[in-house]
């Protein structure tokens, strides 16, 4: 039987099983959200790079989050847009493995960066006098480097475990990108080791970090309640509430996709959940973490004034 098996050299991304008209509408919606995501994160990244007043630990972490969000969406969305209009939905085996590797790298890195940012917020609010000592640049660089390194190494581990498996057909991926669990379904061998490693990684990058984020924001909320000024307390509570909601949605959707029993979540529902997961956080992160900040909005207004003044001249 092994002699009759043909190794797969390319996959077919089935995407959404919808009509042509719905594909066009979906293309238009996703394209607009994609552009908005790139502009929002690119704008925040540009402002942080250009304004020396924003060269602080908090904005340093925000700049890396913006880079992750841009790279994350660019890894999956262009292929999705092409497939919505092009009946030829083929992707090479090497291209599929590359997409899986980068998807895992950026997703895991974002999980860890969100934990780092929650810790930064905790130190800034609950220990403001010691903030500069605790969050010095060596610590910031170490935290960011660790986040990127863990993301890359875990992604490399998962990809290596996939490459050891034989793929002899079928080659149709029931998704709009090479998502790791969907790819594993096509393997012609036992994938128990892959699934065990995925579950262990989820505990490390999802369940564990989520607990740390909850602890950080719980202590932040306790610290906010001790603030004497009612206005300051209201603003801080509003900001932290938005942060916690976004982080909760990000981790919650990922936990549902990778740790919940799959029998409760049909494939089409998982695609919709992934679509939401791929756009919601990268799109709202600039709004929640940056554009609601007075310093960033001040810089943005100054930039718009300069642009309008130059056009008038």
Image (cartoon, grey):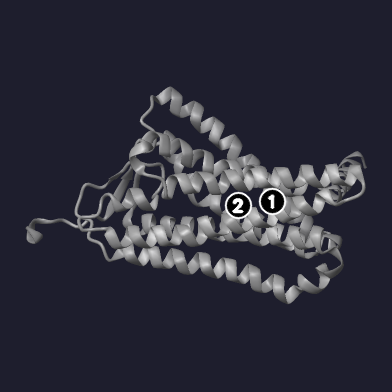
> From the viewer's perspective, is residue 210 above or below residue 134?
above
The circle drawn on residue 70 is 2
Q: x and y percent of residue 92 in the render?
A: 33, 54
Q: Which residue is mark 1?
A: 42
> From the viewer's perspective, is residue 158 above or below residue 41?
below
Q: Is residue 13 left or right of residue 216?
A: left
Q: Residues within 10 Å of mark 2 (few under 14, many from 20)?
A: many
Camera-side residue of 273 and 260: 260
State if disc 2 and disc 1 touch (CB < 8 Å). Answer: yes
Image label count: 2
Residue drawn at point x = 73 percent, y = 49 percent: 289
Camera-side residue of 309 and 258: 258
Q: CA distance from mark 1 to mark 2?
A: 8 Å
Q: Is residue 58 left or right of residue 17?
A: right
Residue drawn at point x = 72 percent, y = 76 percent: 138
Residue drawn at point x = 38 percent, y = 56 percent: 95
The local secondary structure at tag 2 comes to helix
Q: x and y percent of residue 73 in the render?
A: 55, 48
> From the viewer's perspective, is residue 110 above or below residue 288?
below
């Amino acid at each position: 039987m092994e002699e009759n098996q043909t190794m797969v050299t390319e996959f077919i991304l089935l995407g959404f099983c919808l009509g042509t008209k719905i594909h066009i509408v979906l293309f238009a919606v996703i394209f607009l959200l994609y552009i908005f995501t790139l502009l929002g994160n690119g704008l925040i990244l540009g402002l942080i790079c250009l304004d020396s007043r924003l060269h602080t630990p908090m904005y340093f972490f925000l700049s890396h989050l913006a880079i992750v969000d841009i790279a994350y969406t660019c890894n999956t969305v262009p292929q999705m847009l092409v497939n919505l209009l092009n009946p030829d939905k083929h992707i090479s085996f090497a291209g599929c493995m590359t997409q899986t590797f980068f998807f895992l790298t950026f997703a895991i890195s974002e999980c860890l960066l969100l934990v780092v940012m929650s810790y930064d917020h905790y130190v800034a609010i609950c220990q403001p006098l010691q903030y500069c000592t605790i969050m010095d640049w060596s610590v910031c660089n170490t935290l960011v480097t660790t986040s990127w390194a863990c993301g890359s190494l875990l992604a490399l581990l998962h990809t290596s475990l996939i490459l050891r498996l034989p793929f002899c057909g079928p080659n149709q991926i029931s998704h709009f990108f090479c998502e790791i669990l969907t790819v594993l379904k096509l393997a012609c061998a036992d994938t128990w080791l892959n699934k065990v490693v995925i579950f262990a990684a989820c505990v490390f990058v999802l369940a564990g970090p989520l607990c740390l984020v909850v602890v950080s924001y719980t202590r932040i909320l306790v610290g906010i309640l001790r603030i004497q000024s009612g206005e300051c307390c209201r603003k801080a509570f509003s900001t932290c509430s938005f942060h916690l909601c976004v982080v909760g949605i990000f981790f919650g959707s990922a936990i549902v996709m990778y740790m919940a029993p799959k029998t409760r979540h049909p494939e089409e529902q998982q695609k919709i959940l992934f679509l939401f997961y791929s756009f919601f956080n990268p799109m709202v992160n600039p709004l929640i973490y940056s554009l609601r900040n007075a310093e960033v909005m001040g810089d943005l207004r100054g930039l718009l004034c300069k642009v309008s003044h130059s056009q008038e001249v």
